[in-house]
Amino acid sequence: MINRKKFLSTSLKGIAAGATSLSLFPKVIARPSPMNTIKGPMDGLRRLSGFQELRRNVGLFTGRGGTIGWLYNSEALVAIDTQFPDTAETFINGLTERGASSMDLLVNSHHHNDHTAGNGVFAPFAQHIIAHENVPTYQRNSNQDSDAKPITADQRFSSKWSGDFGDETLHLMHYGAAHTGGDTISFFEKAQVAHLGDLVFNRAYPYIDPSSGASVQNWVRVLNTIVEELPKDTIYIFGHGHPEFGITGTWEDINRKKAFLEELLTLGNEAIMAGKSKEEFAQMEVIPGFEEFAAPGWRLPLYYNLNIVYDELRSTS
């Protein structure tokens, strides 16, 4: 359950930034958490397929799409991302089988469908959905050809947000454009577990979305800020990962991803300075020293990254 004083204070800051509607307040601050009567939920979740506890009632769920993160204690239930409708239903069913009747908060780490297509399944179950203020617009833009209207966040923030959920505190941070222009880092303070959405494709070629504000150059700065600001023993949940390296890791995995992006930028600058065309640059089959990023079964090819980096550097030079 969200600490009412902290939630009110945080939401007022969001209003000052134009990110939250005042009309939502009476329902938000007056509604008690339905999770207060649930005792020991983790004992059951440990036995359910796809659910893995990492530390202090915080864990992850694997199905199809971007990794779901969750907090489930005797007083509160929080989830990060929803995957696709079928796996979202599997996730919700796993919770309801353990006695959950409602979710305090759903966080969308960003707008991509493999992280938010299940929002419609979560919507009747979750009291509120929160995301960075850019995410709803990106969601609507990316679903313009669909007849179904995307389920978007009713709570939004610009740079930082915090709330208490039982004996845990959740911090949401946006450090600027990276994978998209609306990426959220979700950090559980007591457990020291952070969900990074797609800020890290662990040892795999990343999806970069310039149409939704992505910046490879700032992505490097964002990863550096994460490593500098979060505790050294933080367990990180990644949106996707190489099967041999997994979807969880440490600051060292983040630095490895940062080094890959830095090398992309270095090679791109060198190609431009040498007068190479984008087509010539994109012919590279592998980046020396980063061979493991050619993950088996991963659909994104290296030339996709090379094309985008080349265009970004040309547009900013």
Image (tube, rainbow, N blue to C red):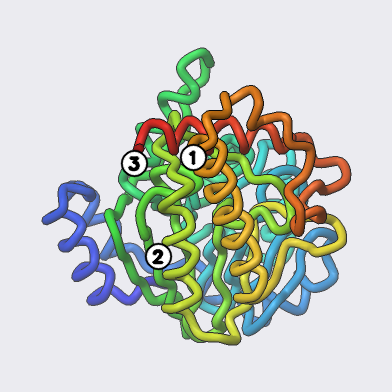
- Mark 2 element type: strand
The residue indicated by pointer 3 is 134
Q: Quadrant of residue 158?
A: bottom left
Label 3 CA crowd tier, 10 Å (few <14, some 14–19, many 20+) = many
Asked whether 168 or 264 is in front, the reply is 264
Asked whether disc 1 touches disc 3, contact meaning CB atoms under 8 Å apart, the reply is no
Asked if residue 191 lies left or right of residue 164, the reply is right
Label 2 CA crowd tier, 10 Å (few <14, some 14–19, many 20+) = many
- Which residue corresponds to the image point at 51% horizontal and 13% vertical from the top-left? 145
- Mark 1 element type: loop
The residue indicated by pointer 2 is 172
Q: Position of residue 14 (x, y in %)?
A: 20, 57
The amino acid at mark 3 is Asn
- Which residue corresponds to the image point at 27% horizontal and 64% vertical from the top-left? 30
The amino acid at mark 2 is Leu
The amino acid at mark 1 is His
The residue indicated by pointer 1 is 111
Quadrant where the image shows the C terminus: top left
Q: Position of residue 213 (x, y in %)?
A: 39, 38
- Residue 98 vs 18, above or below: the answer is below
Asked if residue 241 lies left or right of residue 133, the reply is right
For marks 1 and 3, give the CA distance: 9 Å
Asked if residue 298 lies left or right of residue 256, the reply is right
